[in-house]
Amino acid sequence: MNSKNIQRIDCRDLLSSLPLPACTVKLPDVTVTDCNSGFEAISGLPLLALRGKRFPGMAADAKTDLLQQLAVGMDEAPQRIYLAGKAHRMRMTAKQEDNFRLLCFEPESCECPYGNTEANQAMADLGALMNNAPVGILYSKDRRVVRFNNAFLKMFCCDAGLAMGHPTPAFYPSESAYRTISEQASPLLLAGLPFRQEMLMRRMDGTLFWADAVAYLIKADDPPLGSIWIINDISARKAAEQALQEALLETQAILHNAAVGMLFSRDKIIQRCNQRIEEIFGYSPGELVGLPATCLYPNDESYAAIGAEASPLLSAGRPFMSEREYRRKNGTSIWCRVYAKAVDPAHTDRGTVWLVEDITETRANQLTLEQTLREREALMNNAPVGILVTKERKILQYNQHFARMFGYTGSVAIGHPARELYRSDEEYEALGAKVTPLLSAAQPSINELYMRHQDGYDLWVNLIGYVADNNETNHATFWILEDRTDFKRAEIALAEAYTEQTLIFEHSVVGIAFIKNRIIQRCNRRYEEIYGFAPGELIGQSTRISYPSDQNFDTAAKVVYETLGRGETYIREFIHLRPSGAPIWIRLTGNAIDPAFPNDGSIWNVEDITIRKAAEESIRESELLQRAILDSAKLMILRGGPAQLDRNLVFLSEFSAG
């Protein structure tokens, strides 16, 4: 430590030990370097505001310049100086110490408060108290700053030199704010009462902060003497209060807008609840508060039961959860899911918080779903068709009929690739290409195809596929499988029989026709040939086309349909006409499909017997001729002799042989 620092430390110690107000100044600019608490008291400024500043507010009455007096040394004549706006008669002495001067201030008379050690110590204590106070202290007069402490300077971010004499309205957010505070404070201060207010104040740098200010007049009966303001920066507290208020508002918003009911109960009484609880149980706003908690239960036994279940858990600090029946205000039942937690598990009498969710609809849906699942299970197990569920081309689930149909035992096929149900990769991929676009569009797919039993033989299956969820077509696919193998075999046999019958029908030597309401519905080629029509020409034609006249057509109809109506076969031979008008003999045989309604359909066989009829006519004519000849011969025999008889017999023998 150098000698200069030693001197400064010694000087500081000296200042502290002096019983009178004193300070040190540095020449040649006469700036204060240090002072004791007594000097702070008489100058009205703290050391922080004095240090480095020109000697405050002094003017000597003597004609000799103060700077010159300090430079050459001063006599001990008393000098009049002005500190804090007031004149003081003090004796000022100076001690030469390089370029520093030690200035001591002595009272001129005993009336000065610094005339004795006790008074001086009181002033020193007062100055120390003011400058070390954790709150800002301001003495204002005529709307200007007169005195302040270190905490005030720090609080308002201002320099001591700027603070001195600064207008007090500048410490408010606005002139109107200052006037408002003045109007509020004046009545109290003039009545000798303190004024206290939490308000926004302005720092020297322009920023605002929250302050708790207490003001009182120096003398209530002499307001011009000024006022003292004790200011505490409560910005942190205000911020915390604001955060707490916002948290409270958020909590209230959550509480009143929550989708679940919230309730706080203590001593079996509802203390507080949110709007959702009131909605769930059908109460008006605020109506539940103060009611016994039993009002929410179907009966006292139900309330006691939940208490017995919840108490051990809540006392152990564990949550309680339950789903049970409750009661609305109107007496109707409601199912709720509740969650409860004790505020203080060690003292459960401090209350319990309950969260309540209305699950009446959910429970009903759940019961419906369970019933649906049971019905689905029953359907799966008892369906007369195979039911298969696949996902990502693997077997996910199937019913017993499917297992029997494909030769599986139990659930052994679950997880197997669906490919094993098909005869080949080609058929499997071909089906996939066909059904995928439909299933992707949420449309069902219906196909009949061969599938493969586990024992290796083929099944003919009617396969219907559809997606489980139309909105999620990439989820599971349901398949209904009907074993139509026997139907397929019967169908093949029927097709073969039909083919055979068609061959017989088309190649029959007789004409065959199906007639309904006397209109030809279908006929074979032989029928067309008999009547002389080209293929297909007769379809849709009336049977009148082959009759010689309307009378013949009408007469035949009466006889035909009377016979068919009796369930008998109609058989007749008569003449029909071809389109050319040429007559033909036909043999007509017919049967009604349903004798009760013969017009609704009948089957007819037609034979062309024209040649036979011509032959029969020729034989008949021959027989008539022979009979005539024989009759003539008999006459001749009877008229001639024996010789003529022999000649006639020879002739007859030759005629008969010829």
Image (cartoon, rainbow, N blue to C red):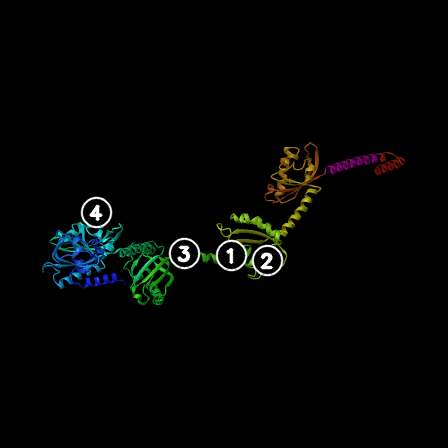
Q: Badge 3 local density, few (<14 within 10 Å), some, or many (20+)?
A: few
State the residue in front, 500 or 485. Answer: 485
Considering the image in quadrants, where does the N terminus appear? bottom left
Indicate the secondary structure of the residue bearing disc 3.
helix
The residue under label 3 is: 362
Return the disc, 3 or 2, that comes first in the chain's sequence.
3
The residue under label 4 is: 175
The location of residue 607, given as percent across then percent down, is 70, 40
The location of residue 231, given as percent across then percent down, is 21, 56
State the residue in front, 608 or 123. Answer: 123
Q: Dominant secondary structure of the magenta stretch?
A: helix
The region drawn magenta spans: 609-635
Q: Is residue 128 magenta?
A: no
The residue under label 1 is: 379
Q: Nearer the viewer, mark 4 or mark 2?
A: 4
The location of residue 656, given as percent across then percent down, is 83, 38
Amino acid bearing label 1: Leu
564 w.r.t. 344: above or below? above
In the displayed structure image, the side of residue 612 where residue 5 appears, left or right: left
* Res 377 seen here: yes
Q: Are marks 3 and 1 in contact (CB under 8 Å)?
A: no
Return the disc, 3 or 4, that comes first in the chain's sequence.
4
Indicate the secondary structure of the residue bearing disc 1.
helix
Q: Are marks 3 and 2 in contact (CB under 8 Å)?
A: no
Q: Residue at left 57%, top 55%?
A: 418
Amino acid bearing label 4: Glu
Return the disc, 1 or 2, that comes first in the chain's sequence.
1
Q: Badge 4 local density, few (<14 within 10 Å), some, or many (20+)?
A: few
Q: Which mark is residue 406?
A: 2
Q: Is residue 625 magenta?
A: yes
Q: Nearer the viewer, mark 4 or mark 1?
A: 4
